[in-house]
Amino acid sequence: MKTYIAAFPIIIALIFGSVTPLFSQNPELLFQQGLVKEEGEGSLYEAIELYIKIVDNQDADKSIKAKALLHVGLCYEKLGRTEATKAYQNLVDNFPGQKNEVAIARERLSLLLSAVQATAIPKSVTLQKVWSGGVTIGWGAISPDGQFITYSDSETDNLAIRELSNGKTSILTKEAGEDPLQFNMGSTVSPNSKQVAYAWYKNNHEIRLIEVDDPHPKVLYGNEDEDVYPCAWSPDGKIIYARSLFNKINQGRILAITVASGEIQILKTFNDAYWYQLSVSPDNQFIAYNVRNYKDSKISDTDINLISTDGKNETSLIKHPANDYLLGWFPDKNQILFKSDRSGTWDAWTVSVINGEAFGEPWRVLTEIGENASQMGFTENGTFYYSLISRKFNTFTAPLDQVKGELKSDLAKPLLGSIGHALWSPDGKSLALIKEQWAINRYPLFIRDLETGKERKLPDWLNVRHLRWSSDGKTLLVAGYDDRRELEKDNNGGIYTIEVESGKVTELLAFSNTQENDGEKSLVWAQTIAKWSDDQKSIYYLKNNQLINRKLITGQEKILSQNKKISKILGLSPDGKNLIVSAEDQIYITSTTGGKLISIVEVNTTTTGPSLRNKAVWSPNENYIFFTKNRDGGSVLWRINAEGKNPKEVWRSKVPISSLSIHPDGQKIVITTLNQESEIWKVDNLLSIEETNNN
């Protein structure tokens, strides 16, 4: 994805040459500058230079040296250089006390060197990365014959295949390119490798079929208000086992769909709509699937159950206090593969299955497969394929000249942590931060005091997706979910106020029907953004393409406009008279009293990388609008005047910008970027592990 042509001896000279003034700087400051170069600008060699200066500084603390050495390895790995292995091994050997960094280094070494540390694992096991790219390459499956991988094309969202022998790609569908509201999300390949069953979004997710050599899609099954996703084929290719979600009533189902007729059989119904995996046994007798367990209305752990393919019998296969997730059924074997954190790290385990019950104790076959490992299936000869998604938010503050339209990225200061959204308080003394805990789908809210550096969490039970400050800085307006109501069918979230000092939460309105499916919840909360009015006696929010003004005291609502073009409210002008709103490819200004949409700029959505909508904010002096254009996996920050004229490029990022906020004095900006990629790995000879352990 990124290339850099340079002679390595020159880099060595830069790193180990004469001492520069930077060497004498504070190691923490050097580390922050390195993060900006690495994650904000993508200047990896420059970042390595800064990190190595920290490592070579005899006065630097071991903790910061370990962090710097870890990032040396990460940078070299991104560049595809073998020096990454040396950096990780150096960290493991010389900084044993820095447990977090050493753990990460061991994980990367495990992947890069195929050095699996499980007990008694035969040397014949091989681990190989076969592809890396945008996040959507992991939304597919390996063909049973091992010839190709299905995936979602990041540029068009169409279903595509990649031939593993030569890297050739082919687009199988075309509807997504013609209609941006349609897209592919997940697929599975028939036993003979000639057909692909895939989920297709068109108002809701339906299951479609397509021939690999004659790509003319047909709808196999679809139902209004139901989202269905194909998970596995029966060994004879006559039935597709699917995951069904009724999100409005919080209900899930396991379906058996006959390929020839589209007839369905409901095998199981859950009063819980969650994303569970399915895998069918080689004899087509059982379906393995994930089940969530709850304690005090919260998810406590996950186990694996079996249900017979006629839906009549169900048993608990793996029940353990740890989290166990299904990876798949070995071909022609009475054994399943699953990942578990029972050993303290996320490893791959296996267990034998006899007559629908676990036989013997599970044993570990691969260490540190990763929490985000997602199965892509087995080939006929037992090779296992899986994807790893890496997702990281990077947030920094930088000096800004709003009049000249200049951002000084060389003076940027990173904010550590996975911060998805950052917003200055009206007095500029605090930042409201939404942090992402992606693995458990949590978005807690924090307030950071910029003078002391201390943070407070507000409140623990609210899952926040977007926020705004009141003009006096005493209250926050947020859109989100009440986690205490997670199991309630009508918990569609709402808009709340939070008193910053006390943490008191008041619900302003609850959404009775988001008219969106579970897979789109992040989009719902990006679209359902409330804005304070200038006098704070009312708010503006967007729901179902309606721009609504709501009086806070009476609850009275007025629809200001209804326009399918509007997909998001981006900002309220400082004088409270206008709103910035966005559509798929335009940014508009509209009056807070209603009226026409006035286009001020055309924007482009990103064609690779994470899918993020464009952002826009008014400058504090009300003379300018700063906005982003997402394209080709990155973002460009632009500035125009309030009339939409005189555009100027301010800053360019190689990854998409997910949020931006300008300090009230107009002299600083806080920006959050999102870097998200997928890697596809294959593991050979896991079946020999089975035989070794069984013997």
Image (cartoon, helix red, strand yellow):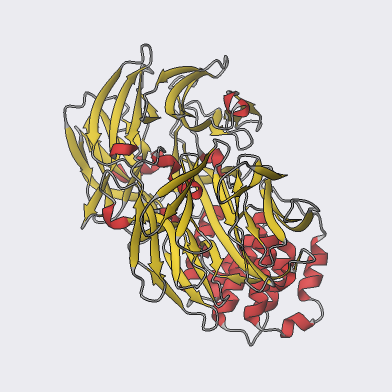
* Above or below, 62 relative to 444: below
- Count of all numbered marks drawn on residues in the image: 0
In the foreground, 144 or 308 = 308
Q: Is residue 410 visible?
A: yes
Residue 3 lies, with reference to residue 10, above or below; the image says above
Q: Is residue 265 left or right of residue 61?
A: left
The answer to whether residue 530 is seen in the rendering is no
Residue at 32% x, 62% y is 461
Give the percent coordinates (x, y) of residue 68.
61, 72
Residue 501 position by quadrant: bottom left
- The residue drawn where x is 64% and y is 74% is 31
Q: Quadrant of the C terminus?
A: top left
Percent position of residue 123, x then y: 47, 49
Q: Residue 492 location in percent, x, y?
A: 34, 46
Q: Residue at x 51, y 46 (%)?
A: 127
Residue ID at (63%, 88%): 59
Would you place residue 466 above or below residue 16 in this image?
above
Residue 240 at x, y percent in the picture: 36, 23
Q: Along the horizontal axis of the image, is 674 left or right of 38?
A: left
Q: Which residue is at the far top?
A: 261
Is residue 470 or residue 430 the one in the foreground? 470
Toward the bottom, the furthest residue is 59
Residue 271 vertical position relative to residue 449 in the rendered view, above or below: above
- Nearest to the observer: residue 365 or residue 585: 585
In the displayed structure image, the side of residue 406 where residue 304 appears, left or right: left
